[in-house]
Amino acid sequence: MSGLGRLFEESAERHADHPALVVNGETYRYGDLHARARAVAAAIRDVDDGGSPLGAICAERSLAAYVGILGTLLAGRGYVPLNPSFPPERTRAMLERSGARTAVADDPGLEALAGVVRDEEALTVIAPDAAGPPSWAAGSPHRVVCAHELGPATGDAAPAAGPEAIAYLLFTSGTTGTPKGIGIRQRNVGAYLAAIAERYDLGPGDRCSQNFALTFDLSVHDLFVSWGAGACVCVPPARTAMAPGRFVADQALTSWFSTPSTAAMMLKMRMLRPGTFPALRWSLFCGEALTVDVADAWRAAAPGALLDNLYGPTEATIACTAYRYDGANGGGDFANGVVPIGRPFGTTRAAVVDGSMQPVAPGEAGELLLGGGQLAGGYWGDPERTGRAFVSVPALEPDGPWYRTGDLASLGPRDELVYRGRIDDQIKIRGHRVELQEVESVVRAASDASSVVALGWPRTAAGADGIIVFLSGGRAADEAVLGGCRRALPEYMVPREVHRIEAMPLNPSGKVDRRRLLETREAMR
């Protein structure tokens, strides 16, 4: 076996008695976690799934979720995380498109699957926490393997996961109204982990945060950077979501990783007093823009930690550029009070080009392109979309493949990449990528409006804190429109407000003037 599964096994063999996971107030050692994962792997290998390369994980951040991820990998499959809180229609689409015929579920996941599964194709659900099968499975073609049916691993070892095998499949918001599937191969995530191991000297004594939802690719860093180093993954309970500072201290964390929005919330709630986190050695931020005021406050709270601002789309495997912020390296790098995204690391290549795919001069803004060993092969089962985003660029060496990020960037005076915004309507909400066109598509179907425009609001330095929509026409009531959104979109994509106007304002090019709509909303304060 190779890849992520073997990475964990090697640490389990070396550090069997060391803590590997803290979740729901319980600590699990590497040896125990390994044994539980092998039992799940054995159950997955017993399933005739038609040779599917993937297995689903329908679970919150629970013991069953982590055992399920490891067990799926040890069974020689990649994993597809499904969020139990997402609308059933969305989860069903992801499950069906993945082709997975097995799923590991905790109790919330089992409940969520009741509204997801259909009888056309059998699904085997492994439920490590369940005493018995749920009522929805009775009389259906679906099988639920409960806790008492799981035994120790038996039989031959799982087949090796080669470099081209899928490690995990994630879905992000799509412009067509359908989430995009991104399959990351073992070699992609292996290149990332190798680069991170050189950058951060984590070891068995470290205790690392696990703040990201499992459907967010930054969670892969949380888990496998830590487990690859023999460190302990510490999962904050839900009750600490609004007060994560106490969790940092209580767990004596040495490595922190979150979106800047989390740090900004902590600053607003006065949790970043100087010297608050003396044990931290590493402070990492990614997923959205990191402002200088938040970075300075965090450095004061964790004076012994090195602070990195990371950047990278899911298509380029977790993160691929970094900027080491020490509070004294500002000046011309800091456009609009935002910390730069830095330089590529590992095997990553980066280029900034104009609309003709020609490199721009230093200081000029252009589209950021990425290449190298972390780059995914394209979108899952979608060659047309892949062809538009993963391109050859004759003006660059090598000429491809390059991924068109849609991000605007420029090269700063110290050869650091500076983020300048987007060339399209994609925004970030608490680190999640949101294509406003997907929201507009759902609202249009729910409202029957002649024109729909979605906007990020309120605006923040890191992106937006939510979404509002403007409608022209349509007979459906506001609550009916929002109800349709709740059935199709995850919570962070559901509009907060619906505003109705007689006609959309147009700019001189005849397109909807989004700036005027934002000004209209600002005037409502």
Image (spheres, rainbow, N blue to C red):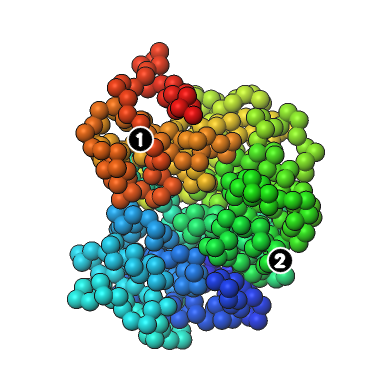
SS at mark 2 in the image: loop
In the rendered image of this protein, does residue 104 appear above or below residue 437?
Answer: below
SS at mark 1 in the image: strand
Name the residue: 69% across, 38% down. Answer: 292
Q: Position of residue 315 (x, y in %)?
A: 49, 47
What is the crowding at mark 1: few (fewer than 14 residues within 10 Å), some, or many (at least 20)?
some
Q: Nearer the viewer, mark 1 or mark 2?
A: 1
How far is the residue under mark 1 from the one under mark 2?
A: 44 Å
Name the residue: 54% across, 63% down. Answer: 239
Name the residue: 26% across, 75% down. Answer: 135
Name the residue: 61% across, 66% down. Answer: 234
Q: What mark, if any, has residue 498 been given in the picture?
A: 1
What is the crowding at mark 2: few (fewer than 14 residues within 10 Å), some, or many (at least 20)?
some
Q: Position of residue 83 (x, y in %)?
A: 41, 59
Q: Which residue is mark 2?
A: 252
Sequence-earlier tag: 1 or 2: 2
Q: Along the horizontal axis of the image, is 488 left or right of 236? A: left
Q: Position of residue 316 (x, y in %)?
A: 53, 47
Q: Is residue 289 visible?
A: yes
